[in-house]
Image: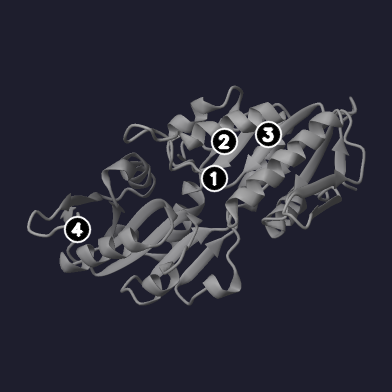
Amino acid sequence: MTGIKTATEKKLMLFSGRAHPELAAQVAEQLEIEVTPTAAYDFANGEIFVRFEESVRGSDAFVIQSHSTPINQWIMEQLIMVDALKRASAKRITVVMPFYGYARQDKKHRGREPISARLIADIFKTAGADRLMAVDLHTSQIQGFFDGPVDHLFALPLLADYVAKRVDRDNITIVSPDAGRVRVAERWTDRLGAPLAIIHKRRDPSVANEVKVFEVVGDVSGRTCVIVDDMIDTASTITKAADALFDNGAADVIVTATHGVLSGPAVDRLKNSRISEVIITDTLPIPDDRHFDKLTVLSIAPLVARAIREVFDDGSVTSLFDGNA
């Protein structure tokens, strides 16, 4: 069956775009339903067509799409799916974006710049979304950009519990790769009972073109350092931070992040670094050519499925993280 009905005929339906169908299938399996059959294809000029092959009238619809490369195409496809659901009389539409595209553009650093993260929220609201669900937003303030409920899910328990099983907890130091990640790193220290170190980046006044010097604040000598971040894009910052930790006497460096963007030279940089393991989740699809021996990918599907179930049952998504994040 493709949906679940309650005694009052409330019906949960799950819809997937084409960006990451494997994740949608895993979420559906956790929910013990099937992804609703959907016809989707591109016209010759790149325009996208979507049509659902079952009635969605009165349904509690969840539209899952990871904003992966090519990011603009997949965002547009998800918007079109929301519009189709709205016009087909779905009762409530929840947009599930495991990775929220354009989240890094969440404020103006200089004049004449966009706040693209706000624009994304506005567009989905205009398309007909009633609710958003995302995993590890780049900044928590993005929750305020959408005029409606936003379920902010955290991968920290999944990642931290994996690390705790792999490493001697008495020898772990949690490392924030920059000042902006300190609050997240503190949650890790609370969960694992580990000390905190911070990578401080500053300009080298003797070198032009804004070359950064990476300074370690905290004692990492002889420790297993766990760098925690929300995403790995080109891996430049992460690998330089790891070098700084080793230069300060770290015994080992492990990297964890929720979103494996892994753009451009990221894989080569990580493979050729002294980092022993890179741990991410599958919020984004990882193509075969992006896999490497040091990479561990954990499934985010159980977390997303539990959150969808809580929303459908009018329960508490926050309860999934009480005491955990």
Could you tell me how far apart the alpha carbons at marks 2 and 1 are, in whole angstroms?
8 Å
Q: Which of disc 4 and disc 3 is earlier in sequence?
A: 4
Q: Is residue 315 visible?
A: no
In the rendered image, residue 322, in percent from the top left (x then y), is placed at 50, 34
Relative image position of residue 323 (x, y in whole percent): 46, 36
User: Which badge, 1 or 3, is on the more N-terminal residue?
Assistant: 1
- The C terminus lies in quadrant: top left
The three-letter code of the residue at mark 3 reads Glu
Q: Pointers 2 and 1 in contact (CB under 8 A)?
A: yes
- Of the two numbered discs 2 and 1 on the same chain, state the one appearing first in sequence: 1
| Residue 28 rendering spot, x and y as whole percentages | 76, 50
Quarter of the image where one finds residue 208: bottom left
Q: Which residue is mark 4?
A: 211
Cα–Cα gap, marks 1 and 3: 24 Å
Q: Are marks 1 and 3 in contact (CB under 8 Å)?
A: no
- Most distant residue in the front direction: 45
Q: Which residue is mark 2?
A: 120
- Please, what secondary structure does the residue beneath circle 2 have? helix
Residue type beneath disc 2: Ile
